[in-house]
Each structure stands twice: as structure tokens, then as C-alpha cells.
Image (cartoon, helix red, strand yellow):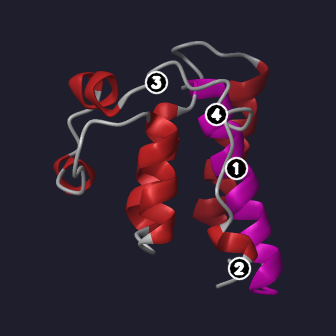
């Protein structure tokens, strides 16, 4: 069975920035019950993420990755996703979405509590 581009497994290199290398370490820091409920056995974060994608648990995979990434990478990814989704939808961002993207970009330039 061929995987679609959205179901491509990630590699160790893709997860290089993830500091919490196991599900045990991750869930000790981020108690996300809806995602933790899908843990079948202790595994690496990479194995767990790839398992979520293979099971088509995309919402949970995105939630897991958004929390696992360093803050700067997670914020950058979120802003990029919002812009790309607007382009795919062939519709401009709503004023509120645009403000959120602008706030994310501002924080990326000056990562302070005031801009967070």
C-alpha cells in the first residue's frame, strides 16, 4: 500500500529538534488526555507520531507535534499552516486569523512574554 504525501512517515532527522524523546517524558510534561489515550505501549516520540499518522489520527498527531516542537518552531509552523490553508481554500484569512498570524510573526521576531 502506497502512503499519500500526508501519511509519509517521518524520520529521526525530522524529529531532531524534539527534546522529549519518549512518550513517557512527553506526557509527564504535557498531560493531553485525548492524545495520551492512544498510547498502546511506551515508545519513542517519533514512533508514536508515525503510529498516529498511520492510524489516520491526524488531529491527535498535529496536537502531539505542536506540543513536542520547541516553541519557536511550533509558532512558526502554526503561522505557516494558517497562511497555506488560506491559499488552499482560495480565500483570504479572516481579520481575526490575520491578527493571529501577525501576532505569531511578531513573537518570532521578539520572543518575549509581552509579545506572546
Of pointers 4 and 2, the one earlier in the residue sequence: 2
Residue receiving disc 3? 21
Side (left or right) of 18 relative to 4: left
Q: Which residues are magenta?
A: 70-91
Residue 115 visible to the viewer: yes
Q: Which residue is mark 4?
A: 15
Q: Is residue 21 left or right of residue 100?
A: left
Q: Is residue 48 above or below residue 97?
A: above
Q: Which mark is first along the chain, 4 or 1?
A: 4
**Mark identifier at residue 4:** 2
Give percent across and percent down for residue 43.
Answer: 35, 37
Q: CA distance from mark 4 to mark 2?
A: 20 Å
Residue displayed at 62% across by 62% down: 97
Residue at (32%, 33%) from the top-left corner? Answer: 23
Q: Nearer the viewer, mark 1 or mark 4?
A: 4
CB of mark 3 within 8 Å of CB of mark 2? no
- Whichever of callouts 3 and 2 sits on the residue coming sooner in the sequence is 2
Amino acid at each position: 500500500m502506497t502512503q499519500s504525501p500526508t501519511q509519509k512517515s517521518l524520520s529521526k532527522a525530522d524529529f531532531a529538534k524534539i527534546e522529549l524523546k519518549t512518550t513517557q517524558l512527553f506526557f509527564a510534561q504535557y498531560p493531553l488526555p485525548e492524545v495520551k489515550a492512544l498510547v498502546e505501549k511506551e515508545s519513542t516520540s517519533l514512533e508514536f507520531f508515525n503510529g498516529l499518522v498511520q492510524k489516520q489520527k491526524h488531529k491527535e498527531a498535529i496536537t502531539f507535534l505542536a506540543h513536542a516542537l520547541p516553541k519557536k518552531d511550533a509558532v512558526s509552523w502554526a503561522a505557516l499552516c494558517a497562511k497555506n490553508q488560506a491559499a488552499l481554500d482560495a480565500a483570504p484569512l479572516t481579520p481575526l486569523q490575520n491578527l493571529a498570524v501577525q501576532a505569531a510573526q511578531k513573537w518570532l521576531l521578539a520572543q518575549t512574554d509581552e509579545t506572546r
